[in-house]
Image (cartoon, coloured by chain):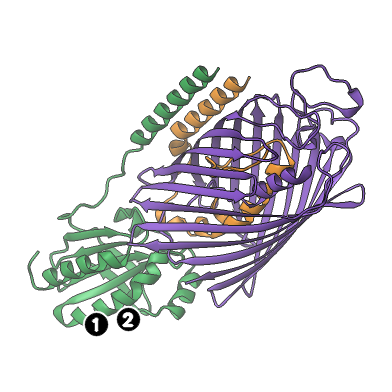
Chain colours: A purple, B green, C orange
Amino acid sequence: MGLAGRAILAAALSMPILETARAETVPESAVISYKYLDYQESQLGEDRIGVKARAWSVLLPFAGDWSVQATYTKDAVSGASPRFWSKAAASMRDNREAKDISVTRYFSHDTLTIGASLSDENDYRSEGFSFAGTHSTEDKNTTFNYGFAVTNDDISSNGLQENKRKVDWALGITQILTSKDIVQLTVTDVQGKGYFTDPYKLFDLRPDSRHQNTAQVRWNHFIEGSDATLRLSYRYYTDSWSIKAHTLGVEYVQPLPGGWVLTPSLRVHDQSAAEFYVNPADFPWTATYSSLDQRLSAFGARTYGFKVSKTFDANWTVDVKYEKYLQRSGWRLFGQGSPDIDPFDAKMFQLGVSYRF
Amino acid sequence: MFNKSKLAFSSGITVLLLAAAASLPVQALEVGDQVPELELPGNGQTVKLPKQPGKVIYLDFWASWCGPCRQSFPWMNAMQDKYKKQDFEVIGVNLDGQAADAEKFLAKVPAKFTIAYDAKGNSARQYGVKGMPTSLLIGKDGKVIYMHMGFNNEGREKLEQAIQLAVEGRK
Amino acid sequence: MRGRTTKLSLLALAMLSASGCSLVQPVQPWEKGMLSRPEMTFETDRLDAAYTEHVYFSKEAASGGSGAGGGGCGCN
């Protein structure tokens, strides 16, 4: 992946998203959280990229009808990627910082949120602004969610000076079905223009635009007998690079006496390849655009996860999460996987502490 | 293709806004209305409304899982203490589906006022409760003086002022 | 193809919103105790979600789904 590629990966890993749905009422208390991530990938039995990240987040209600949320993430990337298809050779370390802040105003049946984010490293700078809101019906059983965001990325590595801009729209509905069931449907539209090529990969030249759409449905179901909650999600993704993907997520949240909560999880992902993705074995390629990036190939992936959390004194919570991610071209459910791709694995470990005050 | 998406998007938004407007409010109690009769089990006694002889009543609909309810209890205790000699009474109607949840809450957050239990929520339905908590200030004549949804520090002063006026016979 | 997906999704959204309130018996405010549990809402652990979403963003082609992502991801 190369030096900048690793930096880009780090940027990807540490950039906080403003997507996570917000409550429709002012938080009762302030919360401060810290979370540590240890990510390690491997391919063909060799360790590849490793990332150690630290993030802090604070949520503060104020002035009765307002809240502010801020997050700061810092991480260090290390390790090498397979050199064959990459221009850079050496194993290096990169650091990056990301921050975001958002402010929400709460009304009796509405909320409005504005946010800004910034991510910085040697050769990559990304800035974003977002606006989002919710509107609930009189009985608050139906809530409409809407959001808009713009992002500007500046890439300057190895004498390159490039730019990429993105405009996001999101629209959704959250519906309470029963006292134990709530569902949410969200559609998004993203238009990106600019530099999408990975400058550190050989034979990588991508179109200067990308139009993406998703439709996602989520369902939370409470199981009275065991006080457990089943959380299901499905997302369909499609874009102008001809990629189509399906992602299914299942979580089972089981509270236990003593403030313990156990959450096993499973995620299944399937994607087709980008239209300009090429197989190294098919060299030479005649198309205008091409990429050997495994990320744009056709494959299936599974994540097995387990999270344990414990709440002490109703104010402190500690959580630990372990996930194993496996990517295989042979695991596609909706088509053929790309040939000649090596299996890819990653392990993710998270440790977090949270304090409510 | 982008124009088609834009059209679909805008028509989608229009339908959603129309649907939102179409969800009309359910009929509820208004200021000046006579409150419906109430007869609910309490701790050792039956709780009845209207009160004979008349008293100013602060009727609060609460549940153990409601955060603002937790915040409102100390204030309601203070109001009960302050104005009880002036023919004033706080009544908290618990709407938990399981009485055990209410007991757990009361063990942590004690109430110095009368508690009534309505697990089926019939009184809440009759009183047009739209959110948790909902409180009504009821005059000696059994008529609604003030209705309030939710509870936060900013609203307390206004509520206390209304109580003061009511116990002094003014509205 | 993409335009069609968007249109179908919006139609589904519109239908859901128009019928959602009348299809089922509306849930009353005092019946929302179970729904108030954090795990029953759609607000996940913010930092956990940020970490995992970005691992998938950098290792897979698909992204997004829950809202309008502010803040750039330098993923080329």
User: What residue sits 53% from the left and 60% below the top?
Assistant: C37
On what subunit does the disc labeled 1 rest?
Answer: B
User: What residue sits 55% from the left and 78% below the top?
Assistant: A313
Q: Secondary structure at mark 1?
A: helix
Q: Which residue is mark 2?
A: B112
Q: Secondary structure at mark 2?
A: loop
Location of residue A294 with respect to C51 vertically, above or below: above
Q: Is residue C45 visible?
A: no
Q: Is residue B3 visible?
A: yes
Q: Position of residue A147 (x, y in %)?
A: 47, 39
User: What residue sits 48% from the left and 51% below the top?
Assistant: A22
* Residue nearest the viewer, comparing C58 with B7: C58
Q: Position of residue A201 (x, y in %)?
A: 78, 35
Which comes before the other along the chain, label 2 or label 1? Answer: 1
What amino acid is found at the position of numbered circle 1 in the picture?
Answer: Asp
User: Is A238 positioned to the left or the right of B99 in the image?
Assistant: right
On what subunit does the disc labeled 2 rest?
Answer: B
Tell me which corner region of the image, top left, top right, bottom left or bottom right, holds residue B108: bottom left
Q: Which residue is mark 1?
A: B81
Callouts 2 and 1 close, C-beta under 8 Å: yes
Q: Position of residue A121 (x, y in %)?
A: 63, 50
